[in-house]
Image (spheres, grey):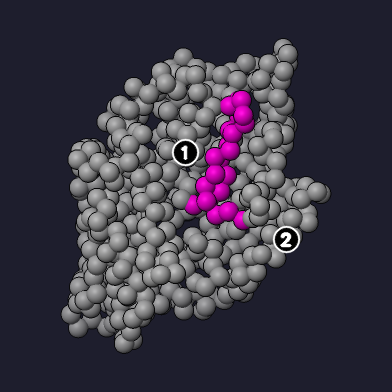
Amino acid sequence: MSDPKAEKVDVVLVGAGIMSATLGALLRLVESGWSITLVERLDGAAAESSHPWNNAGTGHSGLCELNYTPERPDGSIDISKAVQVNEQFQVTRQFWTYAVQNGVLPDVRSFLNPIPHVSFVHGATNVDYLKRRHDALAHNPLFASMEFIADGDEFARRLPLMASGRRDADPVALAWAQNGTDVDFGALAQQFIGYVAQRGMTTLFGHEVRDLRKEKDGSWTLTIVNRRTEEKRKVNAKFVFVGAGGGAVLLLQKSGIREAKGFGGFPVGGAFLRSDRPALTPAHRAKVYSLPQSGAPPMAGAHLDARVINGKSWLLFGPFAHWSPKFLKQGKATDLLMSVKPNDIPSTVKVGLTQRGLVRFLIGQLLLSESDRMRALREFAPSAVDSDWELNVAGQRVQVIRQAAGKGRMLDFATTVLSSADGSIAGLLGASPGASTAVPAMLDVMERCFGERYASWLPKLKEMVPSLGTELASEPALFEEVWSWGTTVLKLDKPANGVPATGTPIESGADTANPTTAAAV
């Protein structure tokens, strides 16, 4: 039996980021009478990985991320991952549309802005790859509007900051998707949490789950500590979701469920150069991604992004690897050590030996100087001036170490939903594409963990996500219908908040050696 002194609730959400926020909103919409408690170790919502300065803010939909479209040995392009990620983002986009239309998300412009997504390459070999990638994607309805651009004048018109001062003779090319998005996942999570809290959810900020125990009746008793007073309380829940970012690894291990055995984590942080100079931001109105460096993890391709944060325009360049043993930006230095169990040490060391390229990459990144980072930026924006940019350390990402059949333990860079066999506890591990696929990930949790109820929820869920259970790539008429619905309701047919719809051309005769002058309007 559960502890008779413990407060009884239906659901506990651990962590106040985008995953818990999304699941909380979904559950409240299908079960208005359920009791929900949210536990967050920090003093506010979305203060870790979902905070706008702790992630790149890209609505990942496979439009520009070149690591999603690898080249096969025969020279053809594998687009399956890009299509999968785009299909997932379409589900997310539809739920956001429903939520805005029905008052769940009252301020769409605070979290979502239209920003083109662009792939950028230079050199004849890479230009040829990008053209073949474009041709492979163009036949799919989800990517049909993508443009391939290899004309220098058009490149300069669309991306004046990147064209300014560019004197190399290497050919350049772009794959341009006008319908990309910039997302403030922090503002989005806060609105979702606010909606659920107004409808009865208990929020415990500044509280930490220190222990959790499975009871004989299948419920979970959590020991929760007030981090300011050290006062303890116990909560008994029928279902627990661990959406604690990098901290999810340690809690799922502590739960003792069989499904968490063999899982571990390896933290990889990030840092970005950023600028809010009014002379620069109008000259770059896109998120521009390039190919990852040799040996870099898949999500480490450099990108120069337009961002909108708190209604203000910024430019962001990176990522540069930043390492800490912490699993959270505001975590503990012992996190990595505590996650490695004694019997896992040999296989964990083996994982490290198989990732020598990644280790070399991380060491090289950690040794970068300020001038090294600016040199990398100038491959995108040749006229960049040091004083215009500052370094911002972003959030921690914990890459999953997992058992793979016949391969032992291996490093996995994808997003992984983990749940117990009885559906009483679930959590989310991993990094990419992460927040952009929060809705399909949480629908997966609901189907896995509430199997008996899920069928009764389906009519309501299909009202929220009309394409649920359907591949939009195979249903172009449905895709056009839900796409138009979302574009209108989410105001994605209007310019981004406070900025022009396209890049601002650099004035003729401007000094291209100095972007502070060249990008002025």
Q: Is residue 86 visible?
A: yes
Residue depicted at x 50% and y 62%:
298
Residue situated in front as seen by the camera: 160 or 25: 25
> Position of 392 compared to 127: left or right?
right
Residue situated in front as seen by the camera: 282 or 87: 87
Q: Which mark is residue 402?
A: none
Q: Which residue is mark 2?
A: 350
Picture layout, residue 333 above or below residue 478: below
The amino acid on which the numbered mark 1 sits, given as a three-letter code, is Ala
The amino acid on which the numbered mark 2 sits, given as a three-letter code, is Lys
Name the quadrant of the C terminus: bottom left
Residue 416 in magenta stretch:
yes
Residue situated in front as seen by the camera: 19 or 53: 19
Magenta residues (range):
411-432
Mark 2 against mark 1, which lies toward the viewer? Answer: 2
Quadrant position of residue 281: bottom left
Residue depicted at x 35% and y 23%:
460
Q: Is residue 202 visible?
A: no
Q: Which residue is mark 1?
A: 441
The percent coordinates of residue 83 (x first, y second) are 36, 51
